[in-house]
């Protein structure tokens, strides 16, 4: 499978632009996994719901973005999430190039 892992210090620093750029630069889906117990999971879930609503304005289906809390080192659960999410994205198919280009133009404006 073609999965690219991008490590960030915390999901709390993720913004809408980070997700949009992921799609612009080739992602067909984005799986956000938090492993730190110090993060307010309720807050992060709420932000992800808000991000999905904003992404819809750019033509990104909400099911292409998923958030999950996986306390490390529970690697088996992470592996299961990767498999499940990859299968979901395969069903959606590739993210359309015209949408990628449209998002890119809007970000450059």
Image (cartoon, helix red, strand yellow):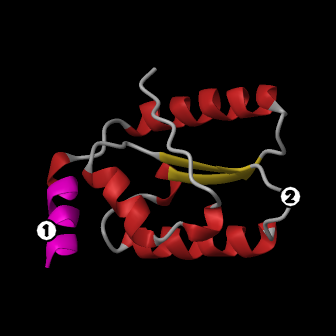
Q: Nearer the viewer, mark 1 or mark 2?
A: 2
Q: Which residue is mark 2?
A: 37
Q: Which residue is mark 1?
A: 105
Residue 93, horizontal then vertical, whole percent: 35, 36
Q: Which quadrant of the figure has residue 83?
A: top right
Look at the numbered disc 2 and give the secondary structure of its residue.
loop
> Crowding near pointer 2: few (<14 within 10 Å), some, many (20+)?
few
Instruction: Please tell me which residue is depicted at 65% across the width and 60% down the height of the picture.
Output: 10
Residue 99, horizontal then vertical, whole percent: 21, 57
Residue 45, horizontal then vertical, whole percent: 70, 68
Q: Quadrant of the C terminus?
A: bottom left
Q: Is residue 13 magenta?
A: no
Look at the numbered disc 1 and give the secondary structure of its residue.
helix
Which residue is at the far top?
1
Q: Is residue 103 magenta?
A: yes
Position of residue 9 in the picture relative to residue 51 (left or right): right
Residue span colored magenta: 99-109
- The disc, 1 or 2, on the residue closer to the chain's N-terminal end is 2
Instruction: Please tell me which residue is depicted at 42% across the width and 58% down the height of the picture.
Output: 61
Residue 32, horizontal then vertical, whole percent: 60, 51
């Amino acid at each position: 499978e073609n999965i690219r892992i991008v490590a960030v210090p915390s999901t709390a620093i993720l913004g809408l632009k980070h997700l949009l750029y992921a799609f612009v630069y080739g992602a067909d889906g984005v799986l956000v996994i938090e492993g730190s117990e110090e993060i307010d999971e309720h807050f992060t879930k709420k932000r992800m719901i808000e991000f999905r609503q904003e992404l819809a304005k750019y033509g990104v289906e909400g099911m292409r973005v998923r958030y999950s809390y996986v306390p490390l080192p529970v690697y088996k659960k992470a592996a299961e999430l990767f498999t499940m999410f990859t299968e979901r994205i395969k069903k959606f198919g590739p993210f359309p190039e015209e949408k990628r280009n449209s998002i890119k133009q809007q970000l450059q404006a």
